[in-house]
């Protein structure tokens, strides 16, 4: 019987010469393909020795390192379900994910072991390990005693490989369940569509707890047997220094904006490069054209989400069309995209409506939320992305907005409802609204607008300081205004569009 384990497919793509370099880190460490083979086997054997139930979740909140990537691959290899968590999450956020996903294994940084293990043990997790970005921690100590021989566990295409938490309009995070089949089909499609070649080298500069860094970038390199230059953190100067050794780069728009601010970004610096890919948030047309002028390369913008991995892409090959700035290109092969009205019926070409999708990449549903899952699919089986867009006569898709109340800041999603709920709980606060406004670096950032209870005094800076103590840093509004009242429509609903308009020039004078 065919093994649909994603790891087996990635492993099969390793080059013949296992002594070749698979990963070079910013610390100057070199990992061969043989190192990846052995370390994932040892860690998979460690997981196996824990006698975990079928479908057990392995949660990880650690700094980016090759060993963290190895834990991901080992989890796949051992047939368990990977649950990556953003390192910025604080205790209340982590408590929610752990209580909701009930992982059997939690891996955290040693500096967080005290509070993370307390949350995990309380939620019934039996195994808590540490892993630090200097190749230490109890996870590696334990794996060191395990065999380096391991056969990837038999998996069906429909078996779960990962759960990625993503929020909804209610602000409560939902775990998007992705299968081995979802991930592998998408990786193979992108390998072909983006023309991955022998000799390609990827600069991996993104975090590995979201779709972009964990799946699109990592799978892209592995399924092509390509070397990665592994940066623990995005640093524009380091990227520039590494460009002559690389051929592919992927980033959220903020990374491109920051690279453009470097005088060293020139055509010469990019001579060896084959492809620059952007996504996770809208790429401004000005970034797209500035990049073209400065480097001679046309950024390829693509569109995806946690529930679907990649959906659309601008063409790689000239014969498939030009890369058009401001658009996210065409549906990927095998993916269907339609733009619909409120009745879920396809709209005529060029009209703006809800983007709905279908394909082998679309997730299996939200973890233990069958009702929520049902709501997000149409009666004829299309997934409602929550994005609003249009398709032109040549088939290019443009995203013009979102029906979901979401701010994308530096490529991270911020759900206003979640932040508003925390602000509304603060003493003296009657109500609050969080809106996204343009920002030159992060694309969009949150601004909070608060009204105080009658007679109470609320200080905007104190609201921000209090949020900082409770929530991941990227969710913190960059400013908080205390105002006498919020603009409302006749139904009494807060008019966020009015607030957005009011504060639109706060960071962008244009
Ligand atoms: C950091 N800060 C942010 C922020 N990141 N503020 C708003 N939005 C963000 N994204 C703030 C911190 O709170 C801090 O504020 C200050 O910036 C410096 O923090 P830092 O950690 O030093 O920031 P930096 O390293 O510069 O991080 C910026 C970044 C990072 C752009 C490199 O945000 C990043 O890696 N973004 C990529 C996200 C990503 O991978 N998304 C893919 C999602 S997948 P203070 O006040 O404390 O100084 C997806 C699907 C798809 O969406 O289609 O791909
Ligand atoms: P996430 O839930 O983090 O996976 O974020 C997915 C969301 O990011 C999508 O629903 C879009 O709103 C947005 N997104 C991803 N890629 C793009 C892009 N190229 N342009 C505009 N928005 C994008």
Image (spheres, grey):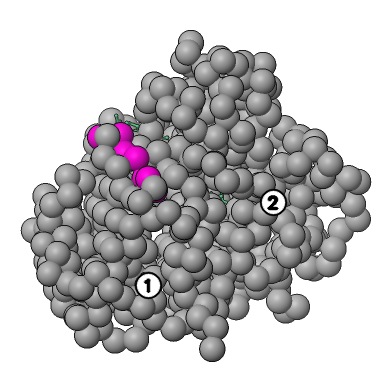
- Mark 2 and mark 1 in contact? Answer it, CB < 8 Å: no
Q: In this orientation, which residue lies closer to the viewer: 14 or 337? A: 14
The residue under the point 47% across, 75% down is: 5
* Residue marked by disc 1: 77
Query: In the image, residue 26 lies at what x, y percent?
Result: 30, 34
* Residue marked by disc 2: 193
Query: In the image, residue 210 lies at what x, y percent?
Result: 43, 53
Mark earlier in primary sequence (2, 1): 1
**Predominant SS of the magenta segment:** strand
379 versus 134 height, above or below: below
Q: Is residue 97 visible in the rendered structure shown here?
A: no
Mark 1 residue's CB less than 8 Å from ligand 1: no
141 versus 508 height, above or below: below
Q: Which SS class for mark 2?
A: helix
Q: Residue furthest left?
A: 114
Task: Look at the image and give the residue range highlighted in magenta.
Answer: 21-27
């Amino acid at each position: 019987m065919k093994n649909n384990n994603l790891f087996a497919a990635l492993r099969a793509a390793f080059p013949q010469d296992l002594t070749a370099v698979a990963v070079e880190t910013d610390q100057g460490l070199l990992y061969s393909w043989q190192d990846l083979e052995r370390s994932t086997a040892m860690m998979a054997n460690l997981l196996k020795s824990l006698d975990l139930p079928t479908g057990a979740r392995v949660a990880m909140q650690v700094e980016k390192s090759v060993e963290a990537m190895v834990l991901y691959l080992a989890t796949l290899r051992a047939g368990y379900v990977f649950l990556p968590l953003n390192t910025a999450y604080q205790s209340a956020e982590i408590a929610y994910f752990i209580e909701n996903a009930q992982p059997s294994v939690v891996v955290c940084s040693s500096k967080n072991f005290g509070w993370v293990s307390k949350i995990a043990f309380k939620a019934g997790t039996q195994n808590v390990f540490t892993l630090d970005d200097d190749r230490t921690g109890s996870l590696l100590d334990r794996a060191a005693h395990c065999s380096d021989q391991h056969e990837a566990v038999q998996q069906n295409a429909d078996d779960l490989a990962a759960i990625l938490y993503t929020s909804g309009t209610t602000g409560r995070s939902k775990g998007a369940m992705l299968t081995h089949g979802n991930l592998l089909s998408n990786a193979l499609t992108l390998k072909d569509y983006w023309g991955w070649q022998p000799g390609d080298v990827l600069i991996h500069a993104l975090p590995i707890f979201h779709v972009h860094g964990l799946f699109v970038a990592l799978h892209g390199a592995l399924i092509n047997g390509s070397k990665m230059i592994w940066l623990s953190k995005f640093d524009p100067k380091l990227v520039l220094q590494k460009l002559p050794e690389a051929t592919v780069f992927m980033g959220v728009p903020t990374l491109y904006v920051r690279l453009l601010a470097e005088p060293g970004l020139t055509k010469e610096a990019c001579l060896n490069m084959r492809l620059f890919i952007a996504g996770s948030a809208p790429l401004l047309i000005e970034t797209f054209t500035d990049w073209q002028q400065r480097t001679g390369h046309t950024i390829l913008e693509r569109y995806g989400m946690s529930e679907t991995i990649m959906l659309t892409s601008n063409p790689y090959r000239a014969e498939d069309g030009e890369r058009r700035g401001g658009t996210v290109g065409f549906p990927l092969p095998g993916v269907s995209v339609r733009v619909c009205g409120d009745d879920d019926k396809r709209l005529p070409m060029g009209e703006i409506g809800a983007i709905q999708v279908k394909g082998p990449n679309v997730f299996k549903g939200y973890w233990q939320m069958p009702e929520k899952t049902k709501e997000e699919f149409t009666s004829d089986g299309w997934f409602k992305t929550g994005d609003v867009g249009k398709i032109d006569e040549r088939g290019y898709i443009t995203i013009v907005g979102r029906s979901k109340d979401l701010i994308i800041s530096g490529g991270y999603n911020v759900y206003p409802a979640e932040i508003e709920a925390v602000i509304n709980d603060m003493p003296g606060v009657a109500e609050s609204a969080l809106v996204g406004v343009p920002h030159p670096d992060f694309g969009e950032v949150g601004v909070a607008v608060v009204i105080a209870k009658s007679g109470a005094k609320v200080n905007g800076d104190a609201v921000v300081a209090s949020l900082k103590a409770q929530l991941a840093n990227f969710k913190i509004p960059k400013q908080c205004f205390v105002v006498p009242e919020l603009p409302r429509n006749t139904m009494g609903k807060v008019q966020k569009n009015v607030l957005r308009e009011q504060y639109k020039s706060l960071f962008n004078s244009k």
